[in-house]
């Protein structure tokens, strides 16, 4: 059984990751590819509890290091209990956010050192990296507007505009540095146009 492929979806707040994840899942199933859908932070019981702590607006101020370590603690659980077993059994993994989000939010948004994040990435992930990443990119006002219309804003979504500008810049830089893996999709178009771009990228990947 060949190892499964690891595909991640990234982007700022409300750009449409969750919406398009369902679309990609259905597209892969249509091609008879066994796939599971999961998310970060989260994906296991403990990791989902850590997610709640991370998103809770009412919690005590979380230090940057605590935030970073909680994210990687959740990731360690997720990899060991969900991602690795699935890939090893030939199942593809479709994940809503992964470590590119850490480089974007904690690196870009919070100005934490990339070298620190890379060190944790190597520690927690070993050689595990996504095979393909779709980066949904849109002007931040559009994503925040969509996120607001969908639900109350969480701890991250309540950050200042400058934070999200930095996040977006860091994501686009990651894409520039990893052009083979990270494909940028324009998310400020109609859903059908976004889906067509996604089909294009996934179609090329399948070939
Ligand atoms: N985080 C996460 C870190 O700081 N570091 C990390 O390492 C990781 C992994 C939670 C937070 O954790 C932080 C970043 C995040 O702030 P999350 O819940 O995955 O992560 O992030 P959110 O961006 O908050 O997820 P959302 O569910 O809000 O946004 P999505 O999934 O991008 O957007 P979605 O699909 O829910 O769509 C939002 C609305 O827009 C509509 C949808 O119908 C929906 O109503 N929509 C469109 N409308 C018009 N045109 C389109 N093309 C549309 N696409 C979607």
Image (cartoon, helix red, strand yellow):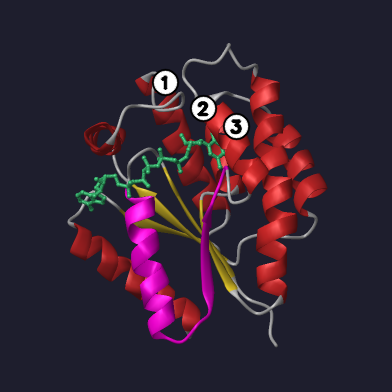
- State whether label 2 is within 8 Å of ligand 1: yes
Q: Is residue 189 left or right of residue 104?
A: left
Q: Is residue 62 left or right of residue 163?
A: right
Dot placed on the residue nearer the N-terminal end, 1 or 2:
2
Image depth: mark 3 or mark 1 in front: 1
Give the magenta range. Answer: 16-41
Residue 103 in view, yes or no: no
State the image coordinates of residue 52 (x, y, percent, origin top left). 54, 32
Q: Which mark is residue 107?
A: 3
Residue 69 in view, yes or no: yes
Quick one: 159 or 112, which is closer to the camera? Answer: 159
At mark 1, the secondary structure is loop
Q: Residue visible at 21% across and 35% down?
A: 149
For the residue carrying disc 1, how many other residues have a C-alpha within 10 Å: few (<14), some (14-19), or many (20+)? few
Dot placed on the residue nearer the N-terminal end, 3 or 1:
3
Quick one: 59 or 144, which is closer to the camera? Answer: 59
Q: CA distance from mark 2 to mark 3?
A: 6 Å
């Amino acid at each position: 059984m060949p190892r499964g492929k690891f595909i991640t979806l990234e982007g700022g707040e409300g750009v449409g990751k969750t919406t398009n994840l369902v679309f990609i899942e259905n597209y892969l199933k249509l091609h008879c590819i066994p796939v599971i859908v999961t998310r970060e932070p989260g994906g296991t019981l403990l990791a989902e509890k850590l997610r709640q702590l991370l998103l809770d607006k009412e919690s005590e101020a979380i230090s940057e290091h605590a935030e970073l370590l909680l994210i990687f603690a959740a990731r360690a659980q997720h990899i060991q209990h969900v991602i690795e077993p699935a890939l090893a059994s030939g199942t593809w993994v479709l994940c809503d956010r992964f470590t590119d989000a850490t480089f974007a939010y904690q690196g870009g948004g919070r100005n934490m050192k990339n070298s620190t994040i890379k060190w944790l990435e190597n520690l927690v992930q070993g050689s595990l990296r996504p095979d393909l990443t779709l980066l949904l990119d849109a002007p931040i006002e559009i994503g925040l507007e969509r996120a607001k219309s969908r639900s109350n804003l969480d701890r991250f979504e309540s950050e200042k505009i400058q934070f999200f500008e930095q996040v977006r810049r860091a994501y686009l830089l990651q894409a520039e540095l990893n052009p083979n893996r990270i494909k940028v999709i324009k998310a400020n178009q109609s859903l059908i146009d976004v889906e067509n771009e996604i089909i294009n990228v996934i179609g090329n990947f399948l070939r």
